[in-house]
């Protein structure tokens, strides 16, 4: 069977050449006589794999020396707890709620201290990013937290919040490596890799070194202390070895594609094709305020639930899979991460055009 165009929000499409390369190395990685899946994480061969992956990521993002790169487990959802455990010295933090994942992180933080919602776009089903230029941030807040790209609702911060000198913590799960970013503007940047970078099971965290200390909340498990992981170069316990190996291959693929500036250009081109069609269509409508649109996740609706269901069903049969929107928004959502080729979006738009013609009375 031919490969489908996979518009899933995650686990998501991976570059085909990375998958082929991994297939070629499945039984014997570079003459080691074993698969990466089977090798010891303490072996010299694996040590080279994880170190090279880190070096390539540092290169792509120009990560300064005073930031640690950690390859962790537990998903972004576990990190919702790790952030307050490791950073809530004053037991207070400011959260900007722009979607379900920011809200979940906010609720998790309440277990550990006082979490204050300083802005929210819940009033309009998270269809925009609130103005964050002059927020009422408590003086003694330990950090300001955002989810930078909202997978479900299709919004993206174009300007980072004015944190008024407080540490910025950002969940970048669904926009990680989709465009250049200035790591120095953040205290902590983290994301699950299963959208843009690799198979589910790895969280990459980039953390400023002065924030990695033994001064964590009482009761923080040893494994969830960033210092434990940093002191052991992400090898305190067995990491998700194979998944990190795939991430490393994707970093090389991005470099080969021309790095993050080229990636951004590629992503803007793809998103424009889809957004331009949505803006002119009589049937399909985007759900996000134009200036806050994500390059990665594009939610849209017809305004008729039965028509939405018919579209998803017919699209799936035509080889455009995972287009059903999240249950909280309904309608459809096309996630067009780095590895989605431009022709995938072009063909989707062509299919939408035909569907509109055939279903307009």
Image (cartoon, grey):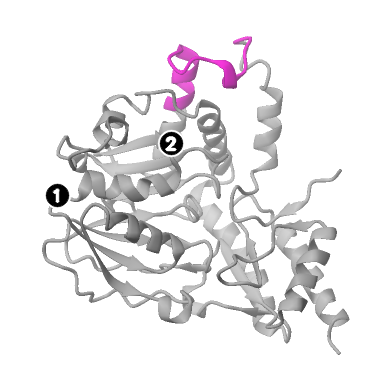
State which quadrant residue 335 falls in: bottom right
**Residue 35 shows up from this direction:** yes
190 lies above or below 21? below
68 lies above or below 106? above
Q: Is residue 135 one of those drawn in magenta?
A: no
46 left or right of 97?
Answer: right
Q: Nearer the viewer, residue 45 or 119?
A: 119
**Residue 63 shows up from this direction:** no
Q: Nearer the viewer, residue 99 or 354?
A: 99
Q: Nearer the viewer, residue 93 or 159?
A: 93
Q: Marks 2 and 1, Cα distance to the nearest angstrom?
A: 24 Å
The residue carrying mark 2 is: 73
| Residue 143 image point, x, y percent | 22, 57
151 left or right of 25?
Answer: left
Q: Residues within 10 Å of mark 2 (few under 14, many from 20)?
A: many
Residue displayed at 27% across by 29% down? 228
In the picture, the disc for residue 89 is: 1
| Residue 96 image point, x, y percent | 32, 67
Closer to the chain start, of discs 2 and 1, is 2
252 lies above or below 269? above
310 lies above or below 115? below
Q: Residues within 10 Å of mark 1 (few under 14, many from 20)?
A: some
| Residue 153 image point, x, y percent | 52, 69
Q: Nearer the viewer, residue 5 or 316?
A: 316
Q: Is residue 34 one of those drawn in magenta?
A: yes
In the picture, the disc for residue 296 is: none
State which quadrant residue 302 falls in: bottom right
Please provide the residue range marked out in magenta. 32-51
190 left or right of 355?
Answer: left
């Amino acid at each position: 069977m031919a490969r489908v165009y996979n518009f899933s929000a995650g686990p998501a499409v991976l570059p085909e050449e990375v998958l082929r390369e991994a297939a070629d190395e499945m039984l014997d990685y570079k003459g080691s006589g074993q698969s990466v899946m089977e090798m010891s994480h303490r072996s010299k061969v694996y040590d080279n794999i994880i170190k090279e992956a880190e070096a390539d990521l540092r290169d792509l993002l120009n990560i300064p020396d005073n930031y640690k790169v950690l390859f962790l487990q537990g998903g972004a959802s576990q990190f919702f707890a790790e952030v307050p455990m490791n950073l809530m010295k004053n037991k207070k933090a400011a959260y900007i709620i722009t979607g379900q994942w920011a809200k979940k992180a906010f609720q998790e933080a309440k277990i550990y201290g006082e979490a204050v919602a300083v802005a929210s776009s819940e009033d309009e089903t998270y269809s925009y990013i609130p103005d964050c230029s002059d927020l009422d941030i408590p003086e003694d807040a330990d950090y300001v937290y955002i989810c930078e790209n909202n997978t479900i609702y299709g919004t993206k911060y174009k300007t980072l919040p004015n944190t008024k000198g407080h540490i910025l913590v950002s969940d970048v799960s669904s926009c990680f490596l989709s465009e250049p970013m200035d790591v120095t503007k953040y205290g902590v940047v983290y994301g699950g890799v299963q959208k843009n970078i690799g198979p589910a099971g790895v969280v990459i965290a980039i953390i400023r070194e002065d924030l990695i200390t033994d001064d964590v909340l009482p009761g923080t498990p040893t494994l969830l202390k960033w210092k434990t992981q940093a002191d052991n170069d992400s090898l305190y316990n067995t990491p998700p070895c194979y998944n990190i190996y795939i991430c490393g291959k994707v970093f090389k693929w991005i470099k080969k594609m021309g790095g993050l500036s080229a990636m951004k250009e590629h992503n803007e081109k793809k998103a424009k094709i889809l957004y331009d069609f949505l803006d002119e269509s009589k049937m399909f409508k985007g759900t996000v305020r134009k200036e806050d649109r994500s390059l990665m996740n594009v939610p849209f609706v017809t305004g008729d639930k039965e028509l939405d269901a018919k579209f998803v069903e017919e699209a799936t049969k035509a080889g455009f899979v995972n287009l059903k929107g999240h249950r909280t928004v309904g309608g459809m959502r096309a996630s067009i991460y780095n590895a989605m080729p431009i022709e995938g979006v072009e063909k989707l738009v062509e299919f939408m055009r035909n569907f509109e013609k055939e279903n307009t009375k």
